[in-house]
């Protein structure tokens, strides 16, 4: 079945550091890929998404590129802020009547 | 007002008690989901419903039941709560008309403690 693997956290960075959170997936067909973010005390919300190979999703300074050849969708940000501290989930959706598969989440802590 | 609401936000109960968690949405979405979140395990799907007449088990449905009372309402019940059901529970909705780009919209969560 489908699966999503994320790097284990927590990840601790200083403000303005470069961020990479790795995500790889296993799926049949051509799923859509997503990054969701969960701020403390809140539910998950969509951060960005990509629907086909080589698509780049971007939002709030975060970017991720759909790499079919490496089955990856790594999340990056050039300069993190304290307000980016949250848990980040990678997910895939095959579409249709198939359910979404989430990774286990990576906690990011940004210190001033 | 929030598009997806959950009640209660926090609940403490005792082993063996029956409890219900409720979810309401104003997004007009047909699809609704219940997940639980545990540290280190991420999100696990309990039940999902693709429309009012459709209910499906997820990967961890044992010990849980659901009711889809209307398009806007999806309730999760623990018939006889046990301590390992202590977790953070999320309701979510999605719109199938968006196809493969289908985004899930989450409620704020219910933190449940079973003593």
Image (tube, grey):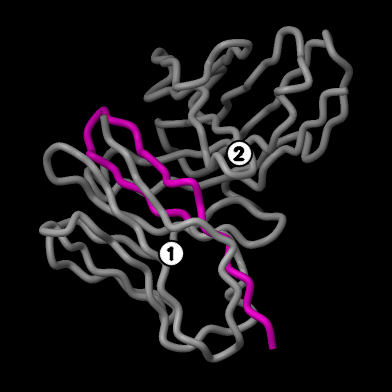
Q: Residue A68: where, in percent of width, then height?
A: 13, 57
- State the residue lying farthest toward the front: A8
Is residue B23 toward the left or the right of residue A80 in the image? right
- Subunit ID for the residue under disc 2: B
Using a 10 Å C-alpha cutoff, classify the residue at mark 2 as few (fewer than 14 neighbours), some (14 to 19) or many (20 or more). Answer: some
Q: Pointer 2 and pointer 1: residues touching (CB < 8 Å)?
A: no
* Residue at (87, 29) in percent of width and height: B12
The residue wearing badge 1 is: A47
* Residue at (70, 26) in percent of width and height: B21
- Measured along the vertical axis of the image, is residue A102 above or below residue A41? above
Residue B99 figure quarter: top left
- Measured along the vertical axis of the image, is residue B34 above or below residue A85? above
- Measured along the vertical axis of the image, is residue A75 above or below residue A8? below
Residue B64 figure quarter: top right
Magenta span: A89-112
Residue B13 figure quarter: top right
The residue wearing badge 2 is: B37
The disc label shown at residue B42, or none: none
Closer to us: A15 or B51 = A15
Instruction: Residue A94: say if magenta.
Output: yes
Closer to us: A58 or B8 = A58
């Amino acid at each position: 079945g489908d699966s999503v693997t994320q790097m284990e956290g927590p990840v601790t960075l200083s403000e303005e550091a470069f961020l990479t959170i790795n995500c790889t997936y296993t799926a049949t067909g051509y799923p859509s890929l997503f990054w969701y973010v969960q701020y403390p005390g809140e539910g998950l919300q969509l951060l960005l998404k990509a629907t086909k190979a080589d698509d780049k999703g971007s939002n709030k300074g975060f970017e991720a590129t759909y790499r079919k050849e490496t089955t990856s969708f790594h999340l990056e940000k050039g300069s993190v802020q304290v307000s980016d501290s949250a848990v980040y989930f990678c997910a895939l959706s095959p579409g249709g009547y198939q359910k979404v598969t989430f990774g286990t989440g990576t906690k990011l802590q940004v210190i001033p | 007002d929030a598009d997806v609401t959950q009640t209660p936000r926090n609940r403490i109960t005792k082993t063996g008690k029956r409890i219900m968690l409720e979810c309401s949405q104003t997004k007009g979405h047909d699809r609704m989901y219940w997940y639980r979140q545990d540290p280190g395990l991420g999100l696990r799907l309990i039940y999902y419903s693709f429309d009012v007449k459709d209910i499906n088990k997820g990967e961890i449905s044992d010990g849980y039941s659901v009711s889809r009372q209307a398009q806007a309402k999806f309730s999760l019940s623990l018939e006889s709560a046990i301590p390992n059901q202590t977790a953070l529970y999320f309701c979510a909705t999605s719109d199938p008309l968006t196809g493969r780009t289908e985004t899930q919209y989450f409620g704020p969560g219910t933190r449940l403690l079973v003593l």
